Image (tube, helix red, strand yellow):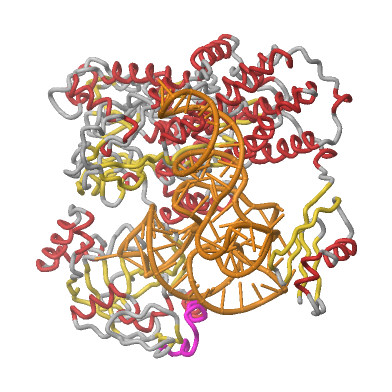
RNA sequence: GCGGCCGUGGCGGAAUUGGUAGACGCGCAGCGUUGAGGGCGCUGUGGGAGUAAUCCUGUGGAAGUUCAAGUCUUCUCGGCCGCACCA
């Protein structure tokens, strides 16, 4: 049998859809909108299978919603600033812009070949000045709102990318993209005040009802809210009080020292008075540029200060130390140490021979050779004695707050977002430095600050620094000489608001309010979980900040979030342990011993990638799409298999043949509904299938939807002869299958739709609705159990009375035999389901 | 260490939300078609016993709730992911 001509079919319909602009969309007041968005790609060269999966999922949802009467916004664009372009420029002597444009061109062609329903008129590219000039305006708005500041601090330095990374971009102490071990470097950087929104970003997570729990948990951890108490300890040197943050006020009576960060103001004061202290602090600070891993392994060290703190209740004197493990940025940069119940304090107390006073009696046997952190009853704690931890915390908090020695405080782990990057291929930060060294934001008249194209990459890391024509300028407000900021934005800046720009991609304004109000928020966002914190947290922050600047009227950008799993493939190694390509590549012939490894995320280094182009050429877009959807639910990893893709292709051919060989007769048939719409087996199965598959679409259970469609088409394959005798019924069944299958495999179904005698595009036809009157099943199989174990089944009319079921069940020969002389103790019957006889 | 998610045939995965476990597919086996291979078609396929009807057993393990547990509860083992000197 010959395979169907997917090349011809797919190309034809792609051209038809494009020339008729059926996916072009504008706001329509009387239509319900639906904004579906997939994370836009970085134009790295070619599409990979991860993209194919991501965009297939989005396309199915878009087409499904379209067919269900929604006004669907489904745009696509390019996250086109970033380092790979610069690296290519150095290695291959191509300009980043040319390299980027070429890649966009290639990938756009590939996307079109997949048949995705994008409104290409809305295409945007972030490295286009039409995009990033608005970003500079946003920066100025943020500046006005006080959300931007410059500060010198230890920052994460990626030695491979040769630029700074935000905290979120450091994964396990390594750069998120380069994988290089991150170093600490003291630098002056621009920051965005994301911490201003920490509370709201955390609090609102609970309202994101349609986000995966996992993502919300990750964000929650990242924001790291801690509720505690800030307690004042007065000092006997007549200086100001020390404020100490704690989440364990119940252990206050066990306090045996106070520890300050080396950057704490009091520590700094004493550094000037005492050389020893000064040296210690210096040592602590030199540790700050250690790699994270090493820093964590440091021994806990401290130096005693020449004064004491007074316990806020007992008034006893407590020694004060500067210690190397206290971080200034967290809490108040000072803690009280309770060695018996905190491991760090315990280690410190052992080292400096400080008292270890137990204040919580463990519930189980416990030897005090390490800190006890479990629950128990308070001891040695005056009025707290006998209480459990929670009660003790409540009581002492109340007491301290009442006596004005403490106040409740909530602190966050989240730090401000450093956005300066020492790189060329990004959006120039619209800042100028005046002669007096002052930095000022560019004025509206200075914008846009266009990235110069005539740059020389041979001189240094950042060619903007060497570009004097561009760098030296005038500040338009005063006309004086000025130097431009030569650093560019972190590229996560671009992706933090692109979803809003898609509403009015060509507007002269940053965001056209009317359009944004119609389309936003994004109803369904789809992308990889690797952006759980990075991009998704930044976008949530931006949306709030833009709201405060009056540019948006929503606070959360993405209503629903789907994080799709990775595309994996088996890995293979040869005798030498080198990665080799999978067998279907035909490149294993020369290897005599092949070791099959586990299935892992497709990656070039493991040689287990499958090129989408090859699949498109061999099987076509519909087969690729079908396979992407059929094997696993979207949020789980999908294992790419050669047999799987072949299976999908075979199935499409089989379906094609069935429809093709019957289409000649069926296309002429006119359906007169009353003639055949009886409650027969086919109609009831069809309606059940429509009902179930529609609900599967709504819940993104595409694998299950496909299983149900296949189940139904199996019926058609088996009963073809019989169905040919009732052409109206046959046509009705086939048209419904084509329609309900069309969001997943749009080209072949479009062709089938026309072959069956329809003239308009299939997407414009109405989605089938299950008729409830045909959903009723006439006969039902009831399970008959004895003591909960299945023994028999019984076919009965739908809704048979309980008493009738009981009568019938008890008269079954097999049941009689099992029951024997026993009298049933109890009989439980659930209508249409089950009868359980307890003996 | 803390937090989250998940364990179902040889494999990917279903299971009306507590009611016939294994849908659909891959793989495998047998048969048919074919000179052969591929392709296609039919049949079978959780495990064990039996010629068979049938019986026993079965959702990582142990216990519990229930007439009834893959589904709920507790413990336990294993895997994946996130956070972590965070006071």
Q: Is residue A797 left or right of residue A428?
A: right
Q: Nearer the viewer, residue A541 or A365?
A: A365
Q: Nearer the viewer, residue A4 or A284?
A: A4
Residue A480 higher or lower than A628, as above or below: above
The image position of residue A39, as x and y in percent, is 46, 33
Residue plotted at (14% across, 60% down): A282
Q: Quadrant of the C terminus of chain A?
A: bottom right
Residue lying at the far top in this picture: please name it: A19
Q: Nearer the viewer, residue A297 or A590?
A: A590
Residue plotted at (51% across, 15% down): A5
The image position of residue A204, as x and y in percent, is 55, 50
Whether residue A222 is visible: yes
**Membership of A384 in magenta stretch:** yes
The image position of residue A348, as x and y in percent, is 23, 75
Q: Quadrant of residue A698?
A: top right
Residue range of the region highlighted in magenta in the rendering: A381-393
Residue plotted at (44% across, 80% down): A375
Q: Is residue A160 left or right of residue B65?
A: left
Q: Is residue A751 left or right of residue A576?
A: right
**Membership of A63 in magenta stretch:** no
Whether residue A398 is visible: no
Q: How many marks?
A: 0
Residue A33 higher or lower than A272, as above or below: above
The chief SS type of the magenta part is helix
The image position of residue A741, as x and y in percent, is 63, 29
């Amino acid at each position: 049998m010959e395979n169907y001509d997917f090349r011809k079919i797919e190309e034809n319909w792609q051209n038809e859809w494009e020339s008729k602009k059926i996916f072009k969309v504008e706001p329509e007041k009387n239509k319900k909108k639906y904004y579906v968005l997939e994370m836009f790609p970085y134009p790295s060269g070619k599409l990979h299978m991860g993209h194919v999966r991501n965009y297939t999922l989005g396309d199915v949802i878009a087409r499904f919603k379209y067919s269900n009467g929604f006004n669907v916004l489904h745009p696509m664009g390019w996250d086109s600033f970033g380092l790979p372009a610069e690296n290519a420029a150095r290695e291959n002597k191509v300009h980043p812009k040319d390299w980027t444009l070429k890649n966009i061109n290639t990938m756009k062609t590939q996307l079109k070949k997949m048949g995705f329903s994008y409104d290409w008129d809305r295409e945007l590219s972030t490295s286009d000045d039409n995009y990033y000039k608005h970003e500079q305006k946003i920066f100025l708005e943020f500046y006005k709102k006080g959300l931007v500041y410059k500060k010198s601090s230890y920052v994460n330095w990626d030695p491979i990318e040769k630029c700074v990374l935000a905290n979120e971009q450091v994964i396990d102490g390594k750069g998120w993209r380069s994988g290089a071990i991150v170093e600490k470097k003291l630098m002056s950087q621009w920051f965005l005040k994301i911490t201003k929104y920490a509370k709201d970003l955390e609090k609102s997570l609970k309202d994101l009802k349609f986000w995966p729990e996992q993502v919300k948990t990750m964000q929650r951890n990242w924001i790291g809210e801690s509720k505690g108490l800030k307690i004042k300890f007065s000092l006997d040197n007549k200086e100001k009080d020390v404020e100490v943050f704690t989440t364990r006020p119940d252990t206050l009576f066990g306090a045996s020292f106070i520890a300050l960060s080396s950057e704490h103001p009091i520590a700094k004061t004493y550094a000037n008075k005492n050389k020893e202290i000064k040296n210690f602090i210096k040592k602590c600070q030199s540790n700050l540029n250690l790699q994270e891993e090493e820093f964590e392994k440091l021994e806990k060290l401290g130096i005693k200060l020449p004064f004491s703190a007074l316990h806020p209740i007992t008034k006893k004197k407590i020694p004060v130390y500067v210690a190397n493990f206290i971080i200034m940025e967290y809490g108040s940069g000072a803690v009280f140490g309770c060695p018996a119940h905190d491991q760090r304090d315990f280690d410190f107390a052992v080292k400096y021979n400080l008292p270890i006073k137990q204040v919580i009696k463990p519930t189980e046997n416990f030897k005090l050779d390490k800190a006890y952190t479990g629950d128990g009853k308070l001891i040695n704690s005056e009025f707290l004695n006998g209480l459990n931890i929670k009660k003790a915390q409540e009581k002492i908090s109340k007491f301290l707050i009442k006596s004005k020695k403490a106040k409740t405080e909530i602190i966050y782990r989240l730090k401000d977002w450093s956005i300066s990057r020492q790189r060329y291929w990004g959006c120039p930060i619209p800042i100028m430095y005046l002669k007096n060294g002052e930095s000022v934001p560019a004025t509206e008249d200075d914008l846009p600050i266009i990235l110069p194209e005539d740059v020389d990459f041979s001189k240094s890391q950042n060619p903007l620094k060497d570009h004097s024509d561009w760098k030296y300028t005038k500040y338009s407000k005063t006309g004086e000489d000025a130097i431009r900021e030569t650093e560019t934005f972190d590229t996560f800046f671009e992706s933090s608001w692109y979803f809003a720009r898609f509403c009015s991609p060509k507007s002269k304004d940053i965001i056209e309010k009317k359009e944004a109000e119609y389309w936003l928020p994004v109803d369904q966002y789809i992308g990889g979980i690797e952006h759980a914190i990075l991009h998704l947290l930044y976008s949530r922050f931006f949306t709030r900040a833009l709201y405060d600047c009056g540019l948006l009227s929503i606070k959360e950008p993405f209503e629903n979030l789907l994080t799709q799993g990775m595309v994996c493939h088996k890995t293979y190694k040869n005798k030498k342990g080198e990665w080799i390509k999978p067998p279907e590549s035909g490149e294993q012939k020369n290897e005599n011993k092949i070791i099959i490894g586990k299935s892992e995320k497709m990656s070039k280094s493991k040689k287990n990638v499958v090129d989408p182009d090859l699949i498109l050429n061999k099987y076509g877009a519909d087969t690729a799409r079908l396979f992407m959807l059929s094997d696993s639910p979207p949020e789980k990893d999908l294992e790419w298999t050669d047999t799987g893709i072949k299976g999908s292709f075979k199935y499409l051919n089989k379906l094609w043949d069935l429809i093709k060989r019957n289409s000649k007769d069926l296309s002429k048939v006119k359906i007169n509904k009353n003639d055949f719409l009886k409650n027969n087996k086919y109609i009831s199965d069809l309606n059940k299938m429509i009902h179930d598959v529609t609900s599967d679409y709504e819940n993104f259970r595409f694998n299950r939807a496909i299983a149900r469609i296949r189940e139904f088409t199996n019926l058609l394959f088996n009963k073809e002869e019989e169905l040919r005798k009732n052409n109206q019924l046959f046509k009705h069944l086939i048209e419904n299958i084509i329609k309900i299958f069309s969001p997943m495999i749009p080209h072949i179904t479009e062709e089938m739709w026309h072959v069956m005698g329809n003239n308009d595009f299939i997407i414009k036809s109405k989605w089938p609705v299950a008729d409830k009157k045909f959903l009723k099943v006439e006969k039902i199989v009831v399970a008959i159990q004895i003591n909960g174990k299945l023994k028999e089944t019984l076919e009965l009319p739908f809704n048979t009375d309980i008493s009738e079921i009981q009568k019938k069940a008890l008269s079954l020969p097999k049941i009689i035999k099992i029951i024997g002389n026993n009298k049933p103790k109890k009989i439980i019957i659930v209508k249409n389901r089950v009868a359980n006889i307890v003996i």
